[in-house]
Amino acid sequence: MHSSPGVKALVAILCGLMAALPESTPAGQGGEPAPAIVALAVGGAPSEPAPFRHQMVLTDRVKTGVFTGREVVNPVNREPIPVYVSDYVLMEYGTGALMAVPAHDDRDFEFAKKFSLPIRRVVEPVDEEVHEDQPFVGHAGNERVVNSGHFSGMSVAEATEAIIRWLEGEGKGRRAVSYRLRDWLVSRQRYWGAPIPMVYCDTDGLVPVPEDQLPVLLPDIADYAPKGSSPLAASEEFVNTTCPACGGAARRETDTMDTFVDSSWYFLRYCDPDNDDAPWSREVVDAWMPVDQYIGGVEHAILHLMYARFVTKALADMDLLGFQEPFANLFTQGMITHQGAKMSKSKGNVISPSTYVERYGADTARCNILFLGPPAQDADWSDSGVGGVHRFLSRVWRLAETARPPGGEPGSFDPSGLEGGALELVRKAHWAIDKVTGDIERFQFNTAIAALMELKTVWHPMGA
Ligand SMILES: [Zn+2]
């Protein structure tokens, strides 16, 4: 999809920028902040405005790099930082050098290991063990800053704000918003995609197709392989049309728009799918939107989500919508890897759910995936728990089949006379209802399932 990194990415990696100051630097005595946090807070190398790293590509390539023989001085703590040229960082957005963060980025970690560069941790989870031999990247929101002078001990949010203020106070940096919206090619020589509803007339120039002739539909063509010009250009029945202005001969636009055009507004149409007069009625869409919850992988956070928000804001500015933000809340789920690597057909490490669906059924397959770990984090596929999950679900099934129906109207059950195991079961059930309700609202499906397993252990001794 993007240019080869070897061509594009002549990028200086500034390594070894992890915190420089001893923990014992007294607070408020001129202790200086960890430079890694500077990278987080102001976006990277001190002399450059807004570099960013690309997060999703080239995770598997062998890292290569060359030391330039030069160092730059970190203006925050005066530590020298070696400058490397490498090909593993893409300049998809932003310009200038990048600060590497080897303790908290998989690829930077690998790079630093290969070139024996210092790896200094600056963020740690409060209540979890961290492994020295791997980067800590599993941010869960409860980290604190370490090895960072008098910013040590703060939460990441507090430290980010404090370091920006410190930099502004020293006149060494300033707060800025960096936009990551990438250029988006909306005109392509491809068959698939959305036709661009414009015609060319020798007399009238470029003329929009009138609304009553929309939508312009793609013709059925057999050969749609790219050939340098649009496959549509070869379709005479598609190309030749009449000019909406003068009625003379005219030619249709034969480029198509990227499919992102459709995914940037389809949710508006979903609110009003039977509308034959317009893409949507503002009244209907304003009543339903925004979407309460958006769930997607991290790639959505910088691609679809940004384009969809951009288009929504443009439509709102045109008074076609009564809101600026299409999605009220974002949940980014992690990826299921296998043996530590992204599943891909070329690597032959794809796990097909159908294997487990055939053997254990869809409920077990789903339950096992949800039970692998917190859905916000990446998880490595394991089937070691599948048998246990299957036995759990089977026992719940048998319990439900054999349990005595309580009788009476819903809500009429009176637990006041219960004692012993029955009382314990009712107590545990209420605990589980509370726990599962909260867990589901926080997308903590793994702990919700664990709570139900715990409930089952109390239920089991009562028969079944
Ligand atoms: Zn014309």
Image: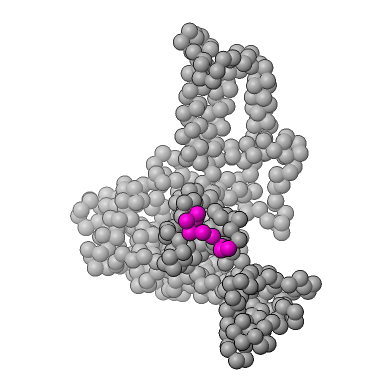
Q: Nearer the viewer, residue 128 or 178?
A: 178
Q: Which residues lie in the magenta part?
A: 277-285
Q: Quadrant of the C terminus?
A: top right
Instruction: Residue 451 in the image: state x and y as whole percent.
Output: 53, 28
Residue pictured at 41% horizontal, 39% vertical: 127
Is residue 115 visible in the rendered image? The answer is no
Q: Nearer the viewer, residue 460 or 218?
A: 218
Does 188 lie within the magenta span?
no
Residue pictured at 62% horizontal, 91% vertical: 202
Residue pictured at 29% horizontal, 66% vertical: 174
Q: Nearer the viewer, residue 403 or 195?
A: 195
Q: How many marks?
A: 0
Q: Quadrant of the N terminus?
A: bottom right
Q: Is residue 36 left or right of residue 66?
A: left
Q: Is residue 211 left or right of residue 235?
A: left
Is residue 205 visible in the rendered image? The answer is yes
Above or below for 360 versus 309? above
